[in-house]
Amino acid sequence: MNVTLSNPPQLIPSSQCVAKLDFRPLSPWPQGLPGVSFQKVQIAGFESELVFDYSPGSENLSELIALFKSLYPDLSFAEFGLLMKVVEFQGLPFNFPREALAAQRGWNTNESFWKILKATQELPAGFLKWCAEKKMAPMECSPLLVAQDLNLSPLLLFIVHFGFSKSQGSQALEMGIELLLLGKSFADLKLDSIQSRDQIESWMSFLRDLRYPQTQTRDREVQAYFKSLPWPGSSQTRWVRQGDKSGLEIKLFVAQPSDLKRYLQSLNKVQEQLEKQDLN
């Protein structure tokens, strides 16, 4: 830790602490190292029998804010939510600086932020751990705000079980909630159609078809058209969608200047053909 403190810490038994903010952080505490407390509220090393207690001589909580930054430099949004839940049920001898700690992480602490945080606190432990590991941002968790009284457990545990990536999980969460709100059931989402991680992308495509049937049909039609164009022989092309935008991705390998000239000539032919078509 690199924190400037007004008073040196005192080594005390953890049993003398008046509260323990054990929010199950992902980062393991070094075995055998004393924990850390602030005004006898334990904030790190929750399994340690001894703690370094920092008790400044004033009510200024800037030292606590600095301590947290030093102890948890990579604290995720999900972990912060768990911390706030623990704080809520502890009688602390000081007002916990939640706004300052959130702002320290670069989060915009508006009303929506705290509502999203509250929604994450009710998620299953396994999914919360997944959110923490993937560093899910507040906006990526925002679909939870419209989930209302939906029972999301089957979808959330499904995401965890098959080890979805952050991007896959974010999209599955958003589309899954939207489909459930539109009256679809978990049977309609076909969660039982996946047997391995290799099938995640095909299931995600099915989910997009279910959520945006017209858009997906249109994308396939445009993709088929682009595939039929006279692209340079060794080029790789594919139609991709990023959020609400879609477009063509082209990869070319150029070994010598003559290759580039040949590619440009072929691309000019493609452009001429595209100009004759109206794809809008």
Image (spheres, helix red, strand yellow):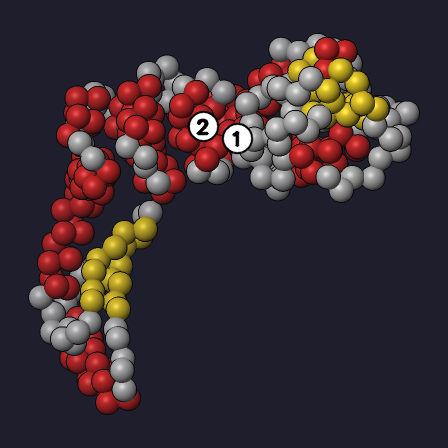
Q: Secondary structure at mark 2?
A: helix
- Checking the image for residue 136, the label placed there is none
Residue 203 horizontal/vertical position (percent): 19, 37
**Residue 255 visible in this rendered orientation of the protein:** yes
Where is 37 relative to 214, above or below? above
Residue 140 horizontal/vertical position (percent): 43, 37
Alpha-carbon neighbours of circle 1 within 10 Å: few (<14), some, or many (≥20)?
some
Occupied quadrant, residue 43: top right
Alpha-carbon neighbours of circle 2 within 10 Å: few (<14), some, or many (≥20)?
some
Quadrant placement of the N terminus: top right
Mark 2 touches mark 1? (CB < 8 Å)? yes
Amino acid type at circle 2 is Lys
Between 3 and 12, the one lying in front of the other is: 12
Where is 262 relative to 183, above or below? below
Occupied quadrant, residue 194: top left
Between 31 and 276, the one lying in front of the other is: 31
Q: Nearer the viewer, mark 2 or mark 1?
A: 1
Occupied quadrant, residue 164: top left
Where is 215 relative to 190, above or below? below
Of callouts 2 and 1, which one flags the residue occurring earlier in the amino acid sequence? 1
- Checking the image for residue 129, the label placed there is 2
In the displayed structure image, the side of residue 170 where residue 278 appears, left or right:
left
- Checking the image for residue 26, the label placed there is 1
Amino acid type at circle 1 is Leu
Between 67 and 171, the one lying in front of the other is: 67
In the displayed structure image, the side of residue 29 where residue 166 appears, left or right:
left
Residue 66 horizontal/vertical position (percent): 74, 36
Give the residue displayed 55% in from the left and 23% down from the top.
Answer: 24
